[in-house]
Amino acid sequence: MAQSKASSTAKKKSGASRSADGKAGNGKAAGAKPKLPSKKEARGLLQRMMIIRRFEEEAGRQYQKAKAGGFLHLAIGEEATIVGTTSVMRDDDYLIGTYRTHGHAIARGTDPKRVMSELFGREGGTSGGRGGSMHIFDLERRFMGGYGIVGGTLPLAAGLGLASDYKGEDSVTVCMFGDGATNTGNFGETMNLAALWKLPVVFLVENNLYGMGTSLERHSAVTDLSEKASCLGVPGESVDGMDVLAVRECVSEHIRKARENRQPTMVEAFTYRYRGHSAADPEVYREREEVEEWQRKDPIESFARRLVDEGPLSESDVEGMREEAERIVLEAVKFADASPEPDLASLYDHLYVVGDQVPGWYAVDERSPDPHPGEEEREAGERAQQLAQKGAAYAGPEAAAQRRDEGDRPDPESAPGPTAPGTEAPEEGDGEPHEESG
Ligand SMILES: Cc1ncc(C[n+]2csc(CCOP(=O)(O)OP(=O)(O)O)c2C)c(N)n1
Ligand SMILES: [Mg+2]
């Protein structure tokens, strides 16, 4: 679909580039080609990108087979930005991302088996199967998630930075988010505090040119995102996010500034997602030619080509690495398939902090001394099971179809779901994956 007249005018005015020519979104030219690292390092970068790519292709396939529930947002095409960034982080640095973070977790060292199990909603998943695709989390590797709220992670990143400061540690937090998130109130508030308090945070905007179906020129008055926080004290720089080495070089310098100078900064990585926003995106907002143009700059293919052309790897090395990625991903699927579903009786686990689970004032339940929904049901055992089954039956497609036929409203006594004044009954689903509105 062609852009509206208003947006193409905005584009001309801003000078924003949407081409895949290696220039940043603000039209700044990319610097000289970065030097190749050691063969071992280069191999590691390529292998990690290949695993992430195959993982996500497979996740898409499994989602179509309804093995993975909820929503699925793939970052296929954005691997160089992810791997380039994580490759220069220390183990004790923190990473926080959005709902498009399967690759981020894998790049941080989380086992693909655990990420796939999370997509499948199984016990072996990073969040015990309770989070799904949008809520991958791995505290051990300091991968702090995995969130559905656009821009919601920015203040959390500032909090992580503040915690490091408070504890006298020199860990850095890297906060990766989309171009769309730069329009949220959280963005301005966080940048101001980060600069004011000199927090050790690198804000990395994955500028893939769209927030869902809305192009950058249509959603942001300032299209040079590297500059968008500079008036708040957070200076920035753009980088070619399709070049893993360029990202690596750029981000390592920004991490250094955060660690040594306590200077928060912004990196705008100019990248592209080859798939739709989520699994059910008809992609009417962009031309096929635009996608193909970016595909010619594929971060994995272009890096592999360079490694073969300049010597460190042979064609057969690259082929062997592809086979290795295939093996790892198929094993992840097998593992996830064999991992058990969470026990129904555990439905209310991990919801409440009770008693002495967490020392400190916030562990005190200030509502009332009585048990509360959830706590009570959990104690009830058998009763919890019945309630959960009732909920599942209520939400199922057959029951929804029946209600639709009967024109019924839910009975607030028997059905879970919002019953507070002013809340609507849950919407009737068709059981098919669909585009989210939120
Ligand atoms: C606060 C909030 N507003 C709106 C949404 C709906 N929403 C989900 S993804 C998305 C687009 C975000 O785009 P961007 O930040 O560029 O990230 P990308 O999906 O391109 O990685 C929107 C508006 C949401 N999840 N949270
Ligand atoms: Mg985007």
Image (cartoon, grey):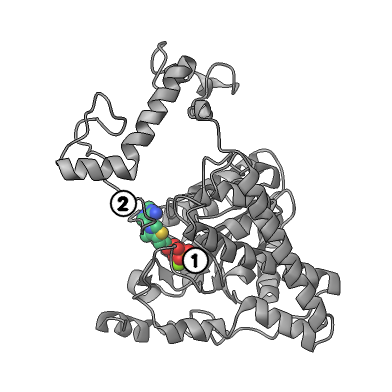
Q: Is residue 269 above or below residue 92?
A: below
Q: Of marks 2 and 1, which one's residue comes earlier in the chain?
A: 1
Give the residue at x 51% y 74%.
Answer: 272
| Residue at position x 62%, y 41% in the image | 163
Give how far across and how far down residue 197 sits, in percent: 56, 49
* Residue bearing the label numbered 1: 230
**Discs 2, 1 touching: Cβ within 8 Å:** no
| Residue 234 visible in the displayed image | no
Rounded to the nearest angstrom, the CA distance separating label 2 from label 1 is 46 Å
* Disc 2, SS: loop
Mark 2, residue position = 430
Q: Say what amino acid the circle numbered 1 marks.
A: Ser
| Left or right of residue 46, residue 235 in this image | left
- The foreground one among 257 and 243 is 243
Q: Position of residue 212 (x, y in %)?
A: 39, 66
> Whole-percent x and y of residue 117?
60, 47
State yes or no: Cβ of the residue under disc 1 lies below 8 Å from any atom of ligand 1: no
- Could you say where residue 240 lies in the image, as x and y percent from the top left? 59, 78
User: How many C-alpha atoms fall within 10 Å of the one at disc 1: few (<14), some, or many (≥20)?
Assistant: some
Q: Is residue 76 left or right of residue 366?
A: right
Considering only vertical position in the picture, is 176 above or below 411? below
Numbered disc in front, either 2 or 1:
2
What label does residue 341 carry, if any?
A: none
Across the whole image, how many numbered discs are drawn on residues? 2
Q: Secondary structure at mark 1?
A: helix
Does residue 273 appear anywhere in the picture? yes
Q: Amino acid at mark 2?
A: Asp
Q: Residue at x 55, y 55 (%)?
A: 97
Q: Quadrant of the N terminus?
A: bottom left
Image quadrant in which you'd find residue 343? top right
Label 2 crowding class (10 Å Cα cut-off): few <14, some 14-19, many 20+?
Answer: few
Q: Quadrant of ligand 2?
A: bottom left
